[in-house]
Image (cartoon, rainbow, N blue to C red):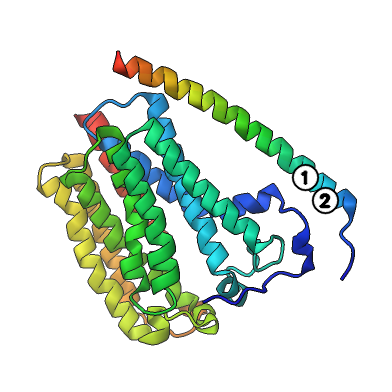
Amino acid sequence: MSPIPEDEVRRRQRERAKVMALLLGLFVILMFAITIAKMTVNQ
Amino acid sequence: MTSLPISPPAHRLPAEWRDLLALTKPRVMSLVVFTGLCGLLAAPVHVHPVLAFAAVLCIALGAGAAGALNQWYEADLDAKMKRTASRPLPAGRMDRQAALHFGVGLAAFSVILMDLAANHLAAAILAVSILFYVLVYTVWLKRRTAQNIVIGGAAGAFPPLIGWAAATGDVSTLPLLLFAIIFLWTPPHFWSLSLFVRSDYAAAGVPMLPVVAGLEATRRHILLYTLPMIAAAVAPWALALAGWLYGAAAVGLGAAFLILAAAVFANRASDAKQMGPEKRLFAFSILYLFGLFGALVADKWLLA
């Protein structure tokens, strides 16, 4: 069994962290927009 | 029960985000999103654009979760079929447990978000559709019976129902007919595919109809299922739930579908290379669903 190259692990972790940060940011914006939309609809 | 060891040691690496995306079957998702969106847009109420977007997003995420869980369970089957051997799990690019966690997490997230953005009914139907696809189709039916996609086809028929429920908070005749259309469309769609990839299914031991009952029986079934599918497609117009634009599309597209299904019925080829009619029907069946649901929305928005 060949050792796992640490560079490759770090690269993948960095890419996944960037994608996750982007998705979390979009989620926050979406939740804010849903809240405002629900308030508008209820009025 | 699936046999677990699929991946080589390379899967100890963290999965690439692209492989996580591939688990969600993005190409299948496009049809699910479209029919869900059409169900939402065909509803007789105004939906706030943000809430509509969130509902369609939840349908997409739910479909992605179901696709991921399907690939998690079927990794051993996928490894035996040319068409699916390059997916992340059979190709050894990802750990199975990561796929399971991703699928379950995404499923829970989509249902909770649907409940927050739309209503309990839409969230409940979304949850049922995910569970139906994973437990009834993937785990129970697919490896056991040639009727797998007849019953399992219901899983793909839920999106317009979910879209409608997200908009209105209830379910009425029209969304049930939309459900019936996709339910009856699924067998001819998948059987035409399974005819020209029969050797793949046979190698993997999946009891698809062409493997179990033969080519002739499958071609006959395709033609027979096309008739109730066309009847279900015309029904919204016949029941005055949709206008003439939709009616014309349902009749025209249905006639084209029937002609292509008849060509499949008449074909006697057993070699996949000579299955032109089957490939044409498969390609057209996708176009058919896009056209039919697009016409329903156009009918409501342009003629209402």
The answer to whether residue B294 shows anywhere in this view is no
Across and down, in percent, residue B3 comes to 60, 77
- Residue denoted by label 2: A9
**What is the chain letter for disc 1?**
A
Q: Which amino acid does label 2 sit on?
A: Val
**Residue placed at 49% from the left, 42% from the top?**
B109
Q: Position of residue B84 (x, y in %)?
A: 59, 68
Relative vertical location of residue B39 with respect to residue A4 in this rendering, above or below: above
Which image quadrant for residue B257?
bottom left
**Element carrying mark 1:** helix
* Few, some or many residues within 10 Å of mark 1 (<14, 14–19, 20+): some
Judging depth in this view, the residue of B50 and B129 nearest the camera is B129
Disc 1/disc 2 C-alpha distance (Å): 6 Å
**Which percent across, then down, holds residue B196?**
47, 76
Q: Name the residue under label 1.
A: A13
Q: Mark 2 lies on which chain?
A: A
Quarter assignment of residue B22: bottom right
The residue at 37%/56% (across/down) is: B156
